[in-house]
Amino acid sequence: MRLFLLLNLRRLVRQPVRTVLGAVAAAAGVALVVSVAVTTTSVSRSFADFASHVAGPAPLRVVGATSRGGLDESVLSTVERTPGVGAAVPMVQAVTLADPGPGAPGGTRTVTGQTGSSVQPVLAVGIDCRAQPLVPSLPCGAGSALATGTTTGPPTLSAALLRRLGPDGVLLTDDGRLPLRGAPVVSRLDAVVGGQVVVMPLAQSQALFGRSHRLDVVYVVPSAGTHVETLKQRLSAAVGPWNGVLRSTDPPPAATVVLGGLVPLFGLMGLFALAIGAVLVYDVIAISLEERRLDLEAGLMGLAGGLLGTVGGVALAGPVTAGLSDFTRRTVGIAVTVHVTPAPFAVGAALGVGLAVAAAWFSARRALRMDVAAELSNRGLRDETAPRVRWRRGALCLGLGLAGVALSWVAGFHGGMYTWQSHLGSVALLGTSTAFALAVALAAPGVALWVLRLWRGRNASVGLGLANLVRNPGRTSVMAVAVGSAVAIAFVVASFDLSIHDAITSAITRTRNQSLRVSTTPPNNALDIDARIPPAVLTSLRHLPGVAGLESGAVVGSGHTSSGLIGVEGQDDQNLPFDVVSGTKDLSAFDRGQVLVGVGLARRLHLRAGSQLALDTPTGTVRVPVQGVWLNGDFAGGVVNMPMSMLTALYGPQPAGEVALRPGPGVTLDQLAREVTAAKLDPDLQVQTPTELASSVSTDVRSQLAPFWALQRGLLLVAFVAVLSTLLLVGAQRRRELGLLAAVGMRPSELFRMVMSEAAVVAVIGVALGALGAIGQYEASHEVIPIFIGYKDPFRLAGGTVVVYGVLVTLVVLIAAALPAWRTSRLEVAASLRYE
Amino acid sequence: MGLLRLDGVSKRFRRGREDVVALDGVELEIDAGEFVSLVGPSGSGKSTLLHLAGGIDQPDDGLVTFDGRDLGRLSVGERARLRRKKIGFVFQFFHLIPTLTVAENVALPLLLDGRRADGAVADTIAQVGLSERARHLPGELSGGEMQRAAIARALVARPRLLLADEPTGNLDSATGKEVLDVLVTEVLEVGAALLMATHDERAAGRAGRVLNLRDGNVS
């Protein structure tokens, strides 16, 4: 065995270029899959870390019907009375903002949407001495703040937060600004959510964050000998179905919503890269196969590639995770950091080995089935002479792709409000992506042949480069697909980017063009941020000169599981802006309490006009009548809209995060904005005209595309590896032929030009076909998008992106081709002809 | 002065840990229009000598002079340019580009040189008797036809020296004779010199001069 291993290692060392190529090809395929695995692990580990710091030994937590103050205080005594409960620890976990003082160090992360501000999300934890079972070292001596339940004074800070905010930092609350000067500092808090945390007495947190007689969570420590699962069942029965009993490590439902949408799409891209990697590894292995047995050799090469790809995947997970973290910090106050465990390395290594061994197996199978007589009669030459351009198969794939687009249209009809449409949409999207990718693969060699025919009689180096592309259609296809997919993803993401911008601008200027937005929180994804407008500021706003009216709205996240999360939106204004796909949007019926639901919610709960929607509230489950289903994309369509008065009746008074100020007669929006700013009511008060609001919301929503852009960079890397490895291998295979070309008078510069031409042509073909395929891909995505986000953005094509990314990808390809071209130009002619 | 001169040319290779002397002070002169055969056992250095004569390799010692120019003083690119203008190569394995037609393969040296190829290519293809096959791809040709196409490629630029390395080694005897007829006839017609390495005694016997290469020396 040792000898066998040694011999294989020696073979690998003797063919360093092929070994490195095989390993890099495997790595390129593995990297994207590993990045998805690392991102998923990072999210769950970040929440588990948070739970371990906050919940300590408590394995269970009771949560309410809403994410903010969803538990009625009376639930605490119910929990305490449940048999098997050793300790019940009530807690407030408010996500708010902190404003650095003038002496704070620069470079802090800003909260998106607050231009020029350096406010940062902070988790404000409210506890009292009942938390001692979780944190035995709590200062609960007589007269301590936690013991007395004081509602004044600064909270306790982490040392890290003090460093970030400086001595004059301020905590924003629903009741106004709370100076942090002189606040006690506890270094151990640095370990909790990266130190972005403050701790205060429970009563103070209830007062400051609008949770009168309300709690966010009750942690439960079982009494000795009580089985956790048994206790969970007892608690579920005791607290009622509108409340939830979760494991302490279960992530908050709002945080998992974004991950649930992203992971399948990322996974699809990862599988795509894996397929390209497999073909590249197959190419590497196929060269040497006739000579020897490759099982172990391929395995070792795959292992190296898998580990290399894992490192790349971990690096790629960084920006992807950062994009997610921006969202989770604002929704639940928990940052997601990259957690690298041994698992991704094991997965990466296994994928690399599996990929390489499978490629070796296919190569071996092909060699075993080889027609020896045909080989000896120079079949290879004839195959290369008349490479099969599979136009029919290409046309079939194109047809399948177009059929996929048609099915996508069916899936997205009426916003995809039926369950079958959701399944159909996923299948159609996957089928369309695959069909168009195959169509590009099958068409690329044919296009190269067409270009070759046009080129005949012109520059010989370029002509030979084109001939090389034609004679190996499989390799040309792989390079073209790798190049095309990088451009296609960029094109699709940029088109959505443009579409989102136009949709938001259009919606805001259409529905809010007569008012100013005034707020202390970011305009988007600020559902759970407790830095609302203080009541005194609201009163002042109402009485400012030029103000004709002030309308407010509120949003509540209802539900304690990610699949049961419902966004409940209440509004004062009389706008019902979205298109109805079923039923009506009658304003008088709306005012009477007949609600409108998003398509996501309609699909999930099978709601139609006339249905009754069951909503969990802090005091029980209530049923509300549905008058229609509409395309409201908040909460990815899992949303219900009702009058503000109805929301208040169901969920209690809600502090206003933002209000709409209507100017009086003769007062323009700009004049009113100047008036509000000049009044200096609150340093954190933002005033935005409709145009400014559209811009900031659009910027924020578009920033959520960042993970897709990160993966697009990953596909650029795959394109680089595909071109580099393919051209190096082709150079190795055609060594004698290249020697002959040099012998008949081809200069080194011309050999260099030949390889670079090959790369340039495949880049242009890949870009062109990729862009064409991307139009179909975007159309399919555009049709099914309401299923995923509950809203249909306008159809926009970012044509400029094709130019920008086409040039970028072409540059990447040319850089990748430079090494093979240089090696070809430095060919030792006599050595390459020595067999003659 | 001869068209091609080798003065004290030596070439050594490293094989594993051992130095192998392929050529050891070879002296050789070939005039324009002369047909010289080079015979010798396998590994005697025939191919090495052709490579040095064609400037695709450099000697360790000695001088290779072609048409009055010391090849050792030319750059790689200059030697390549010289080959495509004045030196033709024919190999045992024809090495035609499979996706190019016969005519396109033959035109290659002219296209590399930036010259128009139409008339010369058609004439050369006709000379080797492949006019009917001009638009065919290499995979559609027999072995003899492929070698004739390779000869046409070597002749199309009207070279002054043709270097042929076992041109009939991959063909049956009848086809080999046919190909050799074409080669000798056409080379002599254009007034070029032909240096042919071969194992085939009958082929070698058609040359005006037969050189025997043994132990790195020509006799």
Image (cartoon, helix red, strand yellow):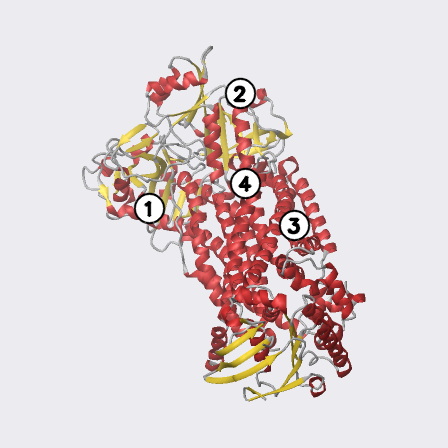
Disc with the residue nearer the chain's start (1 vs 4)? 1
Q: Are marks 4 and 3 on the same chain?
A: yes
Q: Position of residue A499 (x, y in %)?
A: 56, 35
User: Which quarter of the picture shows residue A80?
Assistant: top left
Marks 3/2: CA–CA distance:
45 Å
Marks 1/4: CA–CA distance:
33 Å
Neighbour class for label 4 at 10 Å: few (<14), some, many (≥20)? many
Neighbour class for label 3 at 10 Å: few (<14), some, many (≥20)? many
Cβ atoms under marks 1 and 4 closer than 8 Å: no
Cβ atoms under marks 3 and 1 closer than 8 Å: no
Q: Which chain does tag 4 point to? A: A
Q: Are marks 4 and 2 on the same chain?
A: yes
Q: Position of residue B8 (x, y in %)?
A: 51, 82
Above or below residue A433? Residue A93 is: above
Above or below residue A426? Residue A200 is: above
* Labelled disc at residue A295: none
Give the residue at mark 1: A194
Q: Give the residue type that dot 4 points to.
A: Ala
* Labelled disc at residue A436: 3
* Labelled disc at residue A574: 2
Give the residue at mark 4: A494
Q: Which chain does tag 2 point to? A: A
Mark 3 element type: helix
